[in-house]
Amino acid sequence: MGYSHLFGPVLSRRLGRSLGVDLVPHKTCSYDCVYCEVGSTTHRTTTREEYFPPHEIEEELALFLSPTPDLDFITLSGSGEPTLSLSLGRIIRYVKSNFSSYPLAVLTNGSMLWDPAVREELIPADVILPTLSTVEEESFQKIHRPAPGLTIQKVIHGLRDFREVYKGEIWLEVFLIPGINMEREGLAALGATIRDIRPERVQLNTLDRPGTEPWVSPATHEELAEAARLMGLPGSEPIKSVVYGGPRPSCVENAAAIIRDILKRRPSTAKDLSEATGLHLHEVGKILREMSSDGKLSTCREERGIFYSWTGD
Ligand code: SF4
């Protein structure tokens, strides 16, 4: 059976082997980040909606998880901002009630935490991964291109209010772009705000995959280390490039469909796909060649290799 709302498992740099659950259609988000790997936002909004019938998502989860596959996380993420879905709370409660052996993470931009309903719905999740890359309005607008009404102060207040009630772990992402949000004073102010929010982890991120805007360039390891020092957050971790571990059991019955679903949501190299699916690199290469000859892929060469993106239906 093909899945409409699940994708992967993908190999996530922050969460290991992660089963993605998509609660919103492509590409629905409150931001339109210049570095987004999912592509330009076509529906930019802060209005929450029930985008899909929640029972459909629950049925797919039950089917996928009943053989107890090897996963590090179930992650609400995917084609946009998951907190925009009115099914958020129901799906979190469903996973925690029925599949509690799997940690549940929510990959969010954090822009909806000003809404008390969103804060309440997120409470049963094990890990929340929000983003805070600046405390300055100008760079906030430049990096995230938010929906009307969102300001950096609103986002920061939401994060602070959430911290007061949330007992799980917050792994805060700081996305750094040379020339935009890496100057000394801005990083010092950002560090002070982050200390106030008290996340369990601070993860420094930079461009790893093709982003939406071609002018966005990655920071070097040295620049990330210097940014951590300027923020006064010596424990913050640069998010590592994908590490290829030993072979993992394949969960793949319909390999081409799974690879298609991953590539629809994130550009990936052949090695990423091999690790995420458990397929041998040669098998992944064969599937990619077939997709390419059918005109369903575009490619882009980056530092980590050739990234494939889905361009078919
Ligand atoms: S990076 Fe995340 S928050 Fe930014 S536009 Fe993409 S999906 Fe939305």
Image (cartoon, grey):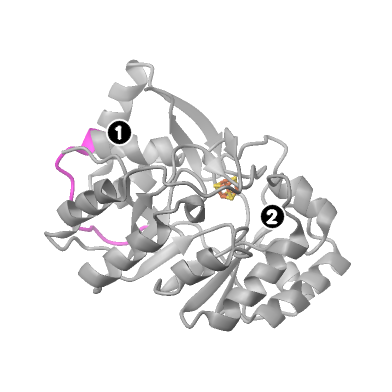
* Residue 288 located left or right of residue 304: left
Tell me if residue 153 comes above or below residue 143 in the rendering: below
Total numbered labels: 2
The disc labelled 1 sits on which kind of residue? Answer: Gly
* Residue 137 located left or right of residue 89: right
Residue at 76% in and 54% down: 140
Q: Which quadrant: the C terminus?
A: top left
Ligand 1 closer than 8 Å to the CB at disc 2?
Answer: no
Disc number for residue 167:
none
- Magenta-colored stretch includes residue 252: yes
Cα distance, mark 2 to mark 1?
Answer: 30 Å
Disc number for residue 219:
2
Q: Position of residue 120 (x, y in %)?
A: 49, 71
Q: Secondary structure at mark 2?
A: loop
Circle 2 residues within 10 Å: few <14, some 14–19, many ≥20: many
Give the dominant element type of the magenta stretch: helix, strand or loop. Answer: loop
Disc on the earlier residue, 2 or 1:
2
Residue at 18% in and 60% down: 69
Ligand 1 closer than 8 Å to the CB at disc 1?
Answer: no
Residue at 63% in and 76% down: 161
Q: Position of residue 219 (x, y in %)?
A: 69, 55
Circle 1 residues within 10 Å: few <14, some 14–19, many ≥20: some
Can residue 99 be spotted in the picture?
A: no
Pick whichever, 182 or 172, lies toward us.
Answer: 172
Q: Position of residue 162 (x, y in %)?
A: 58, 74
The disc labelled 2 sits on which kind of residue? Answer: Ala
* Residue 205 located left or right of residue 169: right
Boundaries of the magenta span: 244-256
Pick whichever, 109 or 206, lies toward us.
Answer: 109
Q: Secondary structure at mark 1?
A: helix
Residue positioned most to the left: 67
Residue at 55% in and 63% down: 239
